[in-house]
């Protein structure tokens, strides 16, 4: 009886914490020792309840009951035994599975504090396919998150960016004091491999010198202190999306991808149509990596969109219903130096970030001129730092504005003051460049019917790639429905 009352008390306290102190509860259960202890307790309780049901059957002695009562009572007790002990056993399995994943993916050590009120995490998309020598960072970005509100700024760095600056305390500055400048070979995505193969001795304490050097370059380029990194394997990405049950985006344009060749044709291009798309893992990966008929800047925008969609749709329901597959896929997806002790605070921020759209910035077209301006080739780092600072400052002004609005409404309920939030800098786009479809881009077939995948394939078969480039020019337009 005492144990039962204790269990009910723990459940009630847990419910109260979930309602009023959810952040503390998430942080508490994100600790591996808590998960281990809770799983042991659940196993013990499951065994205890099973023994109690068996003892109850022995006391009742069903064989002395009437046939109808005997069957009904025995069946009821067995159903209760399976339901209660099974639930506790599954709970122990879930906790232990989560503990194993956290131990395998995250590092040991203390949590780190935000810098100037923000967490800045480098995110790499890595390709280590069997037909490639070593790891190649195909996409690089910096996720800067307000430590209180969860509002996020996602800064994408083109892989072909040149003259990257290293942070002041980076050992890579000894090799490249004026930036990563040695011509077309010194692109941003070459830093990881260069440091791994040639300068690992500069990072004797780092488990991944390539990641550390790339973090230093992101820090020097953006002017924000980079505290940690997450590396996402492209093959693991596909499996993780499938484990989530897919991901949904609203695509603004036609997006090509390579598949099987069409019948009686050498053309193997297929197309995702504009509109809401529900992608499985393979299609999400194709959508994120496509750049046929477009450019790197188009796929950067789609990758930003997919990242936001994944966070928005990675909700408690998904976690509860797909927990085991998500944990298995997560181990194949992520490499990181984020400490286990940090997980609780990051789970809280992720929950806040789910309902808040990212601000997105690309260090190239269309946020810094058009593709023809070649900003990524000849970047102006002072301009980059100023833009980033203004976007972060705008978040702070937005918080102040909302507080001021609330105070004003209390004092003058009949008036609605204008927002003082600064506008986000407008994107610089030109007809035919990223972000817009040129005015002469076909919007229908010659007979007036809507564009179809079959029609686009026909255009490629007859060599009209010029029209396909115009049709695909706005396929960077993507949002989360």
Image (cartoon, rainbow, N blue to C red):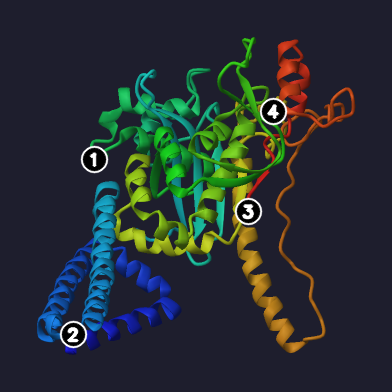
Alpha carbons under labels 2 and 4: distance apart: 68 Å
Front one among 35 and 267: 267
Image vertical order of residue 251 relative to residue 68, above or below: above
Residue 371: which disc?
4
Q: Mark 4–mark 3 contact, CB under 8 Å?
A: no
Look at mark 3 in the image and give the residue it sits on. Answer: 391
Image vertical order of residue 406 relative to residue 87, above or below: below
Give neighbour class at mark 4: few <14, some 14-19, many 20+ (Cα, 10 Å): some
Tag nearer the camera, 4 or 1: 4
Image vertical order of residue 338 relative to residue 445, above or below: below
Alpha carbons under labels 4 and 1: distance apart: 39 Å
Q: Judging from the image, what secondary structure is the residue with disc 2 in? A: helix
Using residue 142 as the reference point, say whether residue 251 is left or right of it: right
Instruction: Give x and y (percent) for residue 202.
Output: 29, 32
Residue 3: which disc?
2
Look at mark 1 in the image and give the residue it sits on. Answer: 205
Residue at horizontal 73 percent and vertical 34 percent from the top: 474
Can see residue 295? yes
Front one among 86 and 8: 86
Can see residue 111? no
């Amino acid at each position: 009886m005492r144990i039962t009352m204790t269990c009910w008390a723990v459940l009630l306290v847990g419910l109260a914490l979930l309602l009023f102190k959810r952040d503390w509860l998430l942080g508490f259960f994100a600790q591996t020792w808590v998960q281990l202890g809770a799983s042991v307790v659940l196993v013990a309780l499951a065994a205890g309840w099973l023994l109690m049901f068996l003892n109850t059957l022995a006391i009742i002695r069903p064989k002395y009951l009437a046939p109808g009562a005997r069957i009904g009572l025995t069946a009821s007790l067995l159903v209760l035994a399976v339901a209660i002990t099974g639930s506790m056993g599954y709970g122990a399995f879930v906790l232990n599975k989560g503990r194993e994943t956290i131990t395998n993916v995250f590092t040991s050590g203390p949590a780190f504090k935000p810098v100037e009120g923000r967490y800045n995490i480098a995110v790499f998309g890595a390709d280590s396919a069997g037909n490639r020598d070593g790891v190649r960072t195909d996409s690089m970005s910096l996720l800067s998150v307000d430590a209180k509100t969860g509002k996020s700024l996602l800064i994408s760095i083109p892989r072909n960016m040149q003259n990257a600056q290293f942070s002041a305390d980076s050992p890579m500055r000894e090799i490249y004091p004026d930036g990563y400048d040695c011509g077309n070979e010194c692109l941003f995505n070459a830093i990881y491999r260069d440091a791994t193969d040639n300068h690992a001795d500069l990072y004797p304490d780092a488990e991944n010198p390539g990641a550390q050097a790339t973090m230093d370059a992101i820090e020097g380029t953006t002017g924000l202190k980079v505290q940690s990194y997450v590396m996402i394997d492209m093959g693991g990405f596909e499996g993780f999306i499938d484990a989530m049950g897919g991901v949904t985006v609203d695509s603004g344009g036609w997006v090509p991808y390579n598949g099987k060749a069409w019948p009686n044709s050498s053309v193997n291009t297929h197309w995702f149509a504009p509109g809401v798309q529900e992608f499985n893992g393979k299609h999400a990966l194709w959508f994120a990596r496509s750049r046929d008929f477009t450019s790197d800047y188009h796929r950067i925008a789609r990758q930003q969109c997919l990242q936001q969609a994944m966070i928005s749709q990675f909700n408690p329901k998904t976690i509860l219903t797909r927990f085991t597959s998500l944990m298995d896929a997560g181990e194949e997806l992520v490499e990181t130096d984020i400490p286990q002790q940090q997980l609780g605070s990051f789970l809280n921020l992720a929950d806040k970030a789910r309902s808040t759209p990212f601000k997105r910035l690309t260090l190239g077209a269309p946020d810094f001129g058009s593709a023809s301006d070649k900003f990524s080739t000849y970047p102006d780092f002072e301009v980059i730092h100023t833009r980033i600072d203004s976007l972060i400052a705008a978040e702070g002004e937005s918080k102040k504005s909302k507080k001021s609005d609330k105070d004003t409404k209390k004092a003058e309920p009949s008036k609605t003051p204008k927002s003082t939030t600064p506008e986000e800098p407008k994107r610089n786009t030109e007809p035919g460049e990223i972000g817009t479809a040129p005015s002469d881009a076909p919007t229908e077939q010659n007979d007036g019917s809507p564009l179809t995948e079959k029609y686009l394939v026909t255009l490629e078969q007859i060599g009209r790639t010029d029209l396909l480039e115009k049709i695909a020019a706005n396929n960077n337009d993507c949002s989360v429905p």
